[in-house]
Amino acid sequence: MVNSKKTKSTAIKFVDAHLASVVKLIRNKCPELVAGTRALLNLSRKPVVIGAKGLTFGAGTSTPYLVEMSAVTSEWLMANLVNKFEVKDPSVVQAFIRSQWSHSVPKSEKAARGQYFTPEHAANAVSRLMQWLATITLAGRRQLSWPV
């Protein structure tokens, strides 16, 4: 008799039903977050082949798509994503990623990519606007010209 608790199911699951957990798996375990997310977005394009530059989705079809990544990431994605999940409706995956992407990126990466960056011209415009508003309030009158 086989102990059912020790054997793992090899049945392929639909990503659509497990999106939050699959995104969490990629965010926490995948060696390359962006490559893992791009792989998830292209998972509906079969077959998937490991190549020298990464994973090719839709290999052998008229529209193959290469997601460049390291060999370690390619093997991880094949073992943990491609061989375990299928996509029933790609638009569901796309909509979920679109709405959840900023929640998946670690705060350290958000800051490095400029989440808290305000362009200089925008900061200067706000500063001039505040100065102009201060002049109106302090003078008790309305100025019609915008300060340069």
Image (cartoon, grey):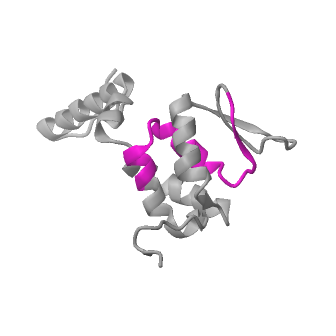
Asked if residue 18 can be seen in this view, the reply is: yes
Q: Position of residue 109 (x, y in %)?
A: 35, 34
Q: Which residue is pictured at 21% across the width and 30% down the height?
A: 131
From the viewer's perspective, is 49 left or right of 4?
right
Q: Residue furthest top?
A: 148
Occupied quadrant, residue 74: top right
Return the residue nearer the eye: 79 or 60: 79
Q: Residue furthest right?
A: 62
Find the magenta span and give its range.
Answer: 24-51
Q: Is residue 112 magenta?
A: no
Occupied quadrant, residue 144: top left
Asked if residue 115 can be seen in this view, the reply is: no
Return the residue nearer the eye: 115 or 61: 61
Q: Position of residue 127 (x, y in %)?
A: 26, 29
Q: Is residue 37 magenta?
A: yes
Occupied quadrant, residue 55: top right
Query: Measured along the vertical axis of the image, is residue 143 above or below residue 119?
Result: below
Q: Which residue is pictured at 59% across the width and 59% down the height?
A: 85
Q: In which quadrant of the rendered image does the C terminus lie?
A: top left
Q: Which residue is pictured at 42% across the width and 75% down the height?
A: 3
Q: Position of residue 106 (x, y in %)?
A: 33, 42
